[in-house]
Image: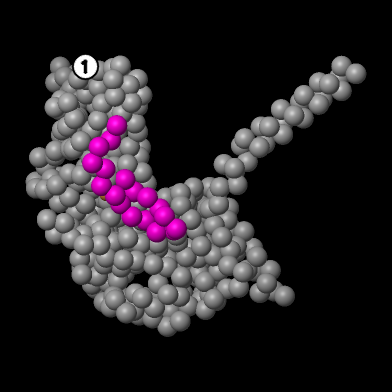
Amino acid sequence: MKILLAGLLAFYSSLADAGDLFIRDAYIPPLPPVGKVYAAYMIISNKSERARTLVGVRAAAFTMAHVHESKIIDGVASMQSVKALEVPAGKSIAMMPGRIHVMLIKPTVDIAAHDTVILELMFADGEVVSVNAELGKIN
Amino acid sequence: MKSITKQVVRSVVAITFYLLTSPLNAQVQGVELDKPELIPSFTLSDKEGTTFTDHDLKNQWTLLMFGFNSCPDVCPFTLGNLEAAVAETAVRVHPDSVPKVVYISVDPGRDRDVVSDYAKFFHPDFLGVTGEQEQIDVLIKATDSFYRFMPADDNGYYEVQHSSSVSVVGPDGMLRAKLQPPFDPGKTAEFLARQQIKFRRKSIQ
Ligand SMILES: [Cu+2]
């Protein structure tokens, strides 16, 4: 029974459903213990008929969380802050390595592989959607 | 007549298909230098005092990657892809020719004590080193690379912009090619194996 419950929880935790915003496949790739700056990736789908805009992320397990976009310009890799990430009506936005990511700086608690990290995605209309991202997963 | 039309249609379809797919196939994984360049002498090290110098470039293939440990996205992604690319290369080349991956942190201030542990996490054979900024700069210049420290934010976090390409150094200590993102494992391995064949042919001549 316990196992079944855990399985069910795991199933639900991988999907965040907040009406018309669906967040799935949230994960944080593994880092060595000496690594202090992580990245989270996920797919945000907007099933509604109006555009929705991600304006920030909160992560209690980290000192800071920022939405960033990696860019390679003239062979040089850099990151830019994404203040507003629009998810058009009926569309999905995929965060992925080398592109848009949630940068997570310095864990405030001990985190280990297979832990789940709660990320709160804040949208421009005030809606906050929580999603559980698994640490140590490679997509 | 009918069959000719069919054939023409088929060719057109084939050409269109080729045109549509070729930009992806032609995606550059590596660029060979017109003229190989000698890497000058330098000394880098890790916290255990293990040194990495120009002498270590001899008699093996080396992949030099620049980065910094507080790089959340591009660096772990590159190291992960290099691990896969080297594994793919290992099935194509002689065990002695499997390239050694050396991760060089351009951020010794934050990374000096942890750079080797960081690199080893991605593969136990990966070497992670850093050093005096001027020694790092010798390699940066020799590989036509670049890095720049960005201003710190309110929490003290600073980014270090850096070249995304990986330098391929031959067993003669010469810079021979550059690998470029996204470092597709199969294509990168193909490119490296081809570089090695070319190198051997030239050495025999
Ligand atoms: Cu970032």
State the quadrant of the N terminus of chain A.
top left
Q: Is residue B205 above or below residue A60?
A: below
- Report the magenta stretch's main SS: strand
Quadrant location, the C terminus of chain A:
top left
Left or right placement of residue B163 versus residue B11 in this view: left
- The residue sitting at 42% across, 50% down in the picture is B81
The location of residue A105, given as percent across then percent down, is 17, 50
* Cβ at disc 1 under 8 Å from ligand 1: no
Quick check: B50 above or below A34? below
The image shows residue A76 at horizontal and vertical percentages of 40, 59
The reply, left or right, for residue A102 in relation to residue B205 is left
Residue shown at 32%/79% (left/top)?
A: B134
A56 w.r.t. B2: above or below: below
What colour scheme has been applied to the protein in the rendered image?
Answer: one colour
Does residue B194 lie above or below B18 as drawn? below
To which residue does mark 1 refer?
Answer: A19
Q: Position of residue B110 (x, y in %)?
A: 20, 66
At a point 19% along the width and 30% down the height, the residue shown is A123
Span of residues in magenta? A69-86
Q: Chain of mark 1?
A: A
What amino acid is at disc 1? Gly
Q: Can see residue A28?
A: no
In the depicted view, which residue is nearer to us: B4 or B201?
A: B4
Which residue is situated farthest in the bottom direction here? B41
Residue A128: quadrant of the picture:
top left
